[in-house]
Amino acid sequence: MPKKRSGGGLSTTQQAAKFLGVSVLAGAVMAGIALPAAGALGLAAKGSVQGFDDIPDNLKSPSLSQRTTILDSKGGQIATVYSRDRTVVDLKDISPYMQKAIVAIEDSRFYQHGAIDLKGILRAVNQNAQNGGVAQGASTLTQQLVKNYFVEEAGDDPTKVAQATQQTIGRKVRELKYAIQLEEKLGKKKILENYLNITFFGEQAYGIEAASQRYFSKPAKKLKLQEAALLAGIVQSPSRYDPVNDEEEALKRRNTVLQRMAEVHDISQEQADAAKETKLGLHVSQPKNGCITAIKGAAFFCKYVEKVFLSDPVFGKTKEDRAKVWNQGGLTIRTTLDPQSQASIQSSLKQHVYKSDKVAAAATLVEPGTGKILGMGQSKPYGYGKNETEYNYSVNYDMGGSNFGFPTGSTFKPFVAAAALEQGRPATQQYSSPNSMLYPSPVQTCSSKPWTNQYNERVPNESESEKGPYQLKEAMAKSVNTYFVQMISDIGLCPVMNQIQKLGVVQGNGDKLPEVPSIALGAKGISPLTMATAYAAFASRGMYCTPVAIESISQQIGGHEKSLDVPKSTCSRAMSEQTADTVNSLLSGVIDSGTGQQAGLTDRANAGKTGTTDERKNAWFVGYTPNLSGAVWVGSATQRVHMVNIQIGGVWQAKVYGGQVPGPIWRDLMTGALAGKDAPSFNLVNIPDPDKNQDKGQDDDGNNGRGRHGGRGNNNTTNGGTISGQSDGGVTFPTPSFSFPDGFIQGNTNNGNGNGGQR
C-alpha cells in the first residue's frame, strides 16, 4: 500500500488514479469555475486528458525576487532596493496562528485532500451554477502556489502577469498538473511554507515576514491570533481589504477569518468572539526601500547606480533584459563611493547652503586616472516634499539630472587653453584683449563654412579699465573674456571642439556643444560630473578616464552566488603631458593670485577655475589636486534666481561669484575628503610673469584682476539647467520651451553667442 508523506496528502499513485478517474469531470468543473456555468462544459470535456499529458513535467520553483544591497567602496551599506519587499523565512518562524488562519480561510481541507479538492470543486460548481456566474472558486493552496510561481516568473511585465492569471481552461489544467507534482515533491508543510513566503499581502509586502513587519512592526513568529487573522484575510483581495486605507472593510474580513477558524475547530468560539472585539492594532512601518533611504546623503549617487545598471548593455542587451535582472534582485553592488569623501561633501554643503535657500548646490568628486566617482551630493535632499527634489543636479538628463545641465561660465576656458597649447601656441601667448570688442569674424569651423559675425555682436569685459594686452597666465588668472575669444579666433573652433570631445564634454542633454566662439564663455549647460571628470584629465597629466560608479556585483540565485560583469572605465590620452602640466601651472595661478583665492588649499598642491554666468544665475568652482578632482555648482535649478542681494547658507551676498560661494564649498569638501591622504605635487611648468605696467582693475572676486562679464549675442536666452516641473523653495514651474535663431549651431551667423559665460 502506498505510503502517505509527512504532512499528509495522497501518494503519486493515488493522485494519478483519482485524476484519471475524474479528468473529464475536472475539465467540466473548471469550466464551471472559470466561466459562466453553462456553455463551456462540452468544450472543457474535449481532449482534457490529452492536453494534460502534453504539459511538460518540469515545473521549476522560481527564484523569488529579493532585496538588492548597495555598498560603498569600504563595504558599508548605502541602501537596499527591491522590486518586491520579501524576506523568506522557515515555517517554524511563522506563528501557528498564521498557519491555521491561512488554511482555514483559503483551503480548510488542505490537510485532507491532495492537489485537487473534489468536494470543494463540486461545491463551487453547484454554487456557480445557482448564481449563473463565478461566485466561488475551488483552488487549493497548492494550486494557488503554482499560480503564484507563474506570477513571480512574469515579474513586472503586465502582459505576462495577465497570462499567468487569466481564467482559462488551459491554465487551470496546467495548474492542476503542476500542483500534483508539488504535492509529491514538497509535501504539505513545505507547500504551506512556500505559499506564505510568496503570496502578496498588499502595501508592497510580499511574503508573511514582510507583511508582519509592514502592518505590525514585528516578526511573523510573534503574530497574535487577531493579527494573523487580519493578514490571512488580506490575501484574497489586498486592495479591497487593505487595513491602512479601509479599516472598516479589513475589520469585517478579519472577523470572517476568525469565525471560519472557529468553524473548523482551530480555535474555540469563545476565542473567536474575544478576538473579534479587539481593534486592528496596526503598528505600520513605512517601506524601507529604495535610494530615498540611503545614508550620508548618498541617495542621488544610489539612483545614479540604478540608472547605470538599467542603461548599460553589460547588464543585458535590451532594457527589458536589464530590468528583469534588476527586479529579480539578490544583488550585492559594491560601488566606488568613498565614505570619507561623501561625508565631507554633505558636511560642506550643509554648512554653506541651506536646503531652504532659494538656490541649490551640487558637488561631485572623481578620482583622476581611474574615473571612479568618490562622492556626489547636493543641498536639497532626495525626496518629494518642500525643499526636496528627485533630480540629480550632478549628472546628465538621461541619468536622472536636469534637462540641459548648467551654464559653466569661465570654468570652460581651460579647455580653450588646452586646445591652443595642443596647437603649438606658447604659454606666453599674448593677445590685445581690449575692454570690449566685436566677435572676430570669420572664424574657421570643422566644416568648410566659417562662422561669421553677421550682426556685429560684441563681447565685453567688466569695466573700462579692463584692457590688455594680456598673456595667457594673467588672462587665465583674471578670466579675461576678450582674451579667450581672440584665442579661438586665432586657432579656430575645430581644435576646441576636438579637445572637448576627447574630454567627454557634452551638454547636459547629451548633445554636442554648438560650434560658435561664445563657447569660450561657458554659456551652455554642462553637468558637474562631466566637469569634474574632464578636469581630472588635467590632474592625471592628460589621461581622460570615463566615469564609473560600480566596482563589482554578485547575485544570489537559488542559494548560489555568481559574479556579474560591470562597466569599466576607458582611459585615453586627451592631451600631451606637457599641455596638461602647463594647464596645471595656469590653474594653480588662479588659486594663488587670481579669482580662486578663497578656494585654495593650504596643505597640498591644488588648481582650479571659477565661473559665474550672466545675471549671476550660476556660480561654479571646478578644481583638483593630483589625486582628486571636484566640481561645485550653485544656482537655481529653474534658472530663475539672480544671485544678487541674496542670503545663502545664512550669509548675505550682495553679488555671488564663482570664487566666493562655490569656492569655499570646494575648499572644505576637498579638505575633508583628502584628510590623511597623500599630497603629491604637480609637474609644474615655469611660465614667466608678464610685465606689470598698469593697474588693471579688479577681478570678479574683488581681487586685482579683470571683470567677469562675457559677450551677449542676439540669443539672450540661456537654456541651461531647466528642469521639468522642478521647484525652488517649493514653487513649481512649468517646463520652459526654447527656440534658437537660424544658423545657431551651423556657425554661419553670429547667433548663439548668447549670454556670455563669465568666470
Image (tube, rainbow, N blue to C red):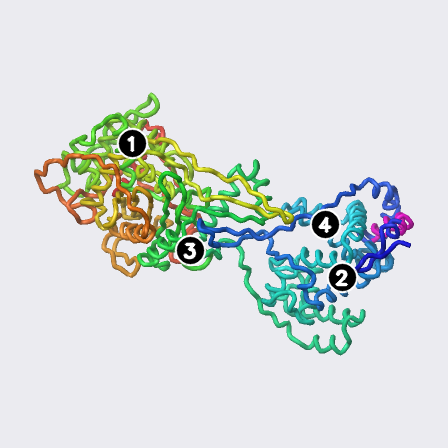
Other residues around mark 4 within 10 Å, as few (<14) / some (14–19) / many (≥20): some
Q: CA distance from mark 3 to mark 1?
A: 36 Å
Quadrant containing the C terminus is top left
Residue at (46% x, 37% y) in the render: 568
Q: Is residue 368 visible?
A: yes
The residue that disc 3 covers is 297
Label 3 CA crowd tier, 10 Å (few <14, some 14–19, many 20+): many
Q: Which residue is mark 1?
A: 577
* Viewer-side label of 4, 1: 1
Left or right: 597, with 719 as reference point? left
Question: Residue 315 appears in which quarter of the rendering?
Answer: top right
- Alpha-carbon span between mark 3 and mark 2: 45 Å
User: Where does the magenta region start and end?
Assistant: 17-32
Specify the amino acid type for callout 1.
Glu
Confirm whether the magenta stretch covers residue 20. yes
Q: Amino acid at mark 2?
A: Glu
Residue carrying label 4:
165
Question: With 702 as the anchor, is 625 left or right in this view?
Answer: right
Q: Compared to 259, does 591 lie above or below? A: above
**Which is more toward the observer, 566 or 105?**
566
**Side of 459 where 188 appears, left or right:** right
- Secondary structure of residue under mark 2: helix
| Coordinates of residue 189 in the picture (x, y in percent) | 75, 59
